[in-house]
Image (cartoon, grey):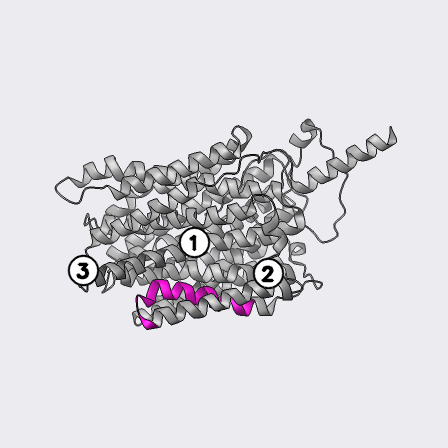
Amino acid sequence: MYHGMAEKATGPSGVLEQEHNAPREPLSFHHKELDRLDPNRPACFPNRSSELGFIFAVAGSIALSEYFVSGFPIVLSSLSDPSNEARTWPAAVINLTAAVLILPFARLSQIHGGRFIFLGGHAWLIVWSTIAAFSQDSTMLIACRAMQCLAPSAFLLSSVVIMSRIYHPGPRNTLVFNIFGAFSCLGFYSGIFFGALSAQFLGWKWYFFIGAFFCAAIFITSLLAIPKRYGDARLDIKMDCLGTATVVPGLVLVAYALTHGGITTRGFVALILGILCLALFVYIEGWRASQPLVSAEVLKTQYVSRLVVALFVSYGSFSLVLFYTSFHIESVLYTGPLLTAPWLIPFAAGGFILALVGGFALQILNVQRLLIISCLGFLGSLILFSIIPGSGISNSFLYWAFIFPAMILAIVGVDVTFNIHNFIITTSLPNHLQAVAGALITSLLYLGMAFWLGVVEMATSAQKEVKITETLGASNQCQIGFWTGTGLALVFVTVEIQSANADLAADEKEQREREVDVRQNME
């Protein structure tokens, strides 16, 4: 889920890609003038309908991505082997694929233009969603799932690039990015609902057919609504082929070793090869590449290195909540898919409300206080899930006493985290670094999910070895996942970003300092 955020005189959230050599008006930093920035509809939209069509297209893309993330575990549970091991790899593969390809697609969006990559990603998703619906076995389904996952890597990043070019700082920008975040919650619950409907009544194939239909609607709307001038290519930017060739296999091998390799020779070999590839990637990016995928300047910026670690563990915590909540409800409480869907309504409703209004919290509270709220949300949620009694108590009591408040706390944690990372990017980094920083952090979102699901799977395999058993109870598997998430939340609590404040973006601060210097010299 991606959320916009409100901030006084900051750039738009997420990945920012400014127009190349675009003329700029002189900046004025009087607060009343800053509050009046961009109150009207952008000039590229001739009427309100065209702007609404554009918002539907870009917001629908994040909803579609969440649809395929949230509903797939429910569909998978209706297949022949609903065990944790059989569910983990297919559930993690979308996160893994998106994580390893976000950075390359960020560069492709710069080279070929955001509009082209955005449309291409949706066309790709339509094709592979349709093919997945005709899968003959689990191997083919996982392969189609992996190919399907190339699409979010393309259109998620390019959609934010396009929005960032069209909407400048101001209340309209805040509203559009908040709608973008709110649609992710709608897509998340839509995936749960249609996944449950398909698993119990329609047949699992219809889950993919419905997704392909939604994707086709978004593709047609995008073709008509996205202004063509926001698809210009940048011939001065080159692809970092060596960096791509090392980071992609490195992340895939590490995630495979954790998720599917187990405590075996095969797993250790994959892990070692993956670490070597990632070490080579660091060397190439730091000392060889002329236009690296990840600039060292990004990590040297104040708070960004801390933010990278914090987001890696916080997104991991949230992924464990998402995956093992549905697994616990279905496999431990023996709740059917259609009853699981209404049980998970708090995830969607709470997230939708916080997405719309949560960005404005940065105008009231500073980042450190919001970070504490986020940490407590994650920690409280995972502790509640970890101490759920095993048996002898009614499901209704367990839901209202443990599951419902835990889901609300988890939503608070993840929504506040997204707002914080958007704030840090837009206020601490100059414009020329915001695109790569946004891509890096978006990659961390998916990588954290895939990596920590793999860690829990490895812990489950180790527990089986200790107990000398081929299977482990669903309750025990969930406990391993929830307690691992609790540990990650405790790590997140230690992060401190104390002096960050919501005033101006980095470029605006620098421009203001220059104006002050010029004024003093003239006096």
Q: Are marks 2 and 3 in contact (CB under 8 Å)?
A: no
Residue 295, x across and y down, in percent: 62, 56
**Residue 482: mark in rendering:** none
Give the residue at x 78% y 35%.
515
Q: Which comes before the other along the chain, label 2 or label 3?
A: 2
Q: How much space separates mark 1 and mark 2, taking CA atoms?
A: 19 Å
Circle 3 residues within 10 Å: few <14, some 14–19, many ≥20: few
Helix, strand or loop for disc 3: helix
Q: Which residue is mark 2?
A: 293
The reply to whether the magenta stretch includes residue 264 is yes
Q: In this rendered view, identify the residue nearer to me: 241 or 175.
A: 241
Q: In this rendered view, identify the residue nearer to me: 196 or 298.
A: 298
Q: Which residue is mark 3?
A: 467
Regarding residue 29, the answer to whether it shows in the image is: yes
* Residue type, numbered disc 2: Leu
Q: Which residues are magenta?
A: 244-265
Assign the C terminus to one quadrant of the image.
top right
Give the residue at x 44% y 40%.
494
Q: How much space separates mark 1 and mark 3, taking CA atoms?
A: 29 Å
Give the residue at x 34% y 47%.
485
